Amino acid sequence: MRRKHIVLFLLFLLAFPLTAWTNSKALYQMSEADIDSFLKSIQGKSFLERVAWISERAKGTPYFLGPLGEGSQSSYDKKPLIDLTRVDCVTFSEQTLAFALSKTYKEAFDTLQKIRYKEGKIAIEYRNHYVMADWVPNNHWLATDVTKEVGGDLAKPLTRTISHKKLFEQMNYKGLVAKIPDRKVTIQYVPDDKLSSISSRLKTGDLAIFIQDQEGIFAAHMGILIRDAKGQLVLRN
């Protein structure tokens, strides 16, 4: 199946070298106390530098599709509200951003809920289920979609019908009423055969979302772009 691509920018930052932190543990191996110490050690760096450092420490985290839910008290998804021991592409990105925005584990936990849920309301009806239709507009305080700005004439529009009702039915969430009615959403994307033309404009901290050829959904994958000290662009996901 052919995939198209869209790029979202958070902010801009020049490439910079990473040096070793004194604790060599990966993020998923750290205790809350370790994380507090780690976050304290990088507070003097810019937000996007912290994104690079934290995503570096998160490399190697075991993969698990859909690792997070609304906690043990939820009637529908009892998986935890945070779990650094396993991630999928979305939770990898969300947790990296939450820690980059925070000074402590506790603050990052709270920030993560603001990122994952509309208005921070922890309920499955308010979760940002669809990256392009929910996550992007509800996180306008954090991320700005500049696909059209960066892609210019190479960017193309794509419209699809997004349905929480159908999603909840597919997930067998019996009795769960969708808060958001079905709606048509139009996004901009840059075709994959045109990405080389805009790659020089991509910077550390940019979010890359891969758009798929499937009705009813836009995103197939998500990650954070990093421009390393040699100027090479990598995707952490």
Image (cartoon, helix red, strand yellow):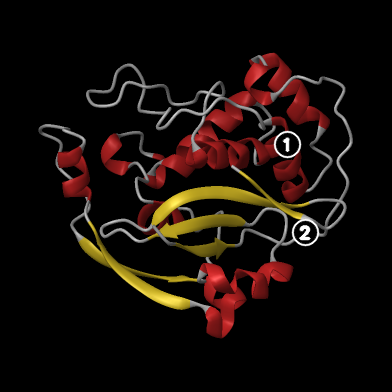
The answer to whether residue 155 is visible is yes
Q: Left or right? Give the position of 26 relative to 221.
A: right
The amino acid type found where label 2 is placed reads Leu
Residue position marked by numbered label 2 in the rendering = 13
The amino acid type found where label 1 is placed reads Glu
Residue under the point 31% across and 56% down:
217
| Mark earlier in primary sequence (2, 1) | 2
Farthest bottom residue?
A: 153
Residue under the point 36% across and 34% down:
122
Residue position marked by numbered label 1 in the rendering = 56
* The disc label shown at residue 176, or none: none
Farthest front residue?
A: 1
Q: Position of residue 31 (x, y in %)?
A: 66, 14
Which quarter shows the N terminus? bottom left
Give how far apart the Cα atoms at labels 2 and 1 are: 16 Å
Residue under the point 61% across and 74% down:
150
Q: Left or right? Give the position of 44 relative to 103.
A: right
Q: Residues within 10 Å of mark 2 (few under 14, many from 20)?
A: some
Depicted 74 relative to depicted 117: above or below: above
Q: Position of residue 232 (x, y in %)?
A: 79, 56
Residue under the point 74% across and 44% down:
52
Viewer-side residue, 119 vs 1: 1
Q: Left or right? Give the position of 3 relative to 227.
A: left
Q: Residues within 10 Å of mark 1 (few under 14, many from 20)?
A: some
Viewer-side residue, 198 vs 8: 198
Q: Quadrant of residue 103?
A: top right
Q: Position of residue 43 (x, y in %)?
A: 79, 37
- The total of numbered circles placed on residues is 2
Secondary element under disc 1, as helix, strand or loop, is helix
Viewer-side residue, 53 vs 120: 53
Secondary element under disc 2, as helix, strand or loop, is loop
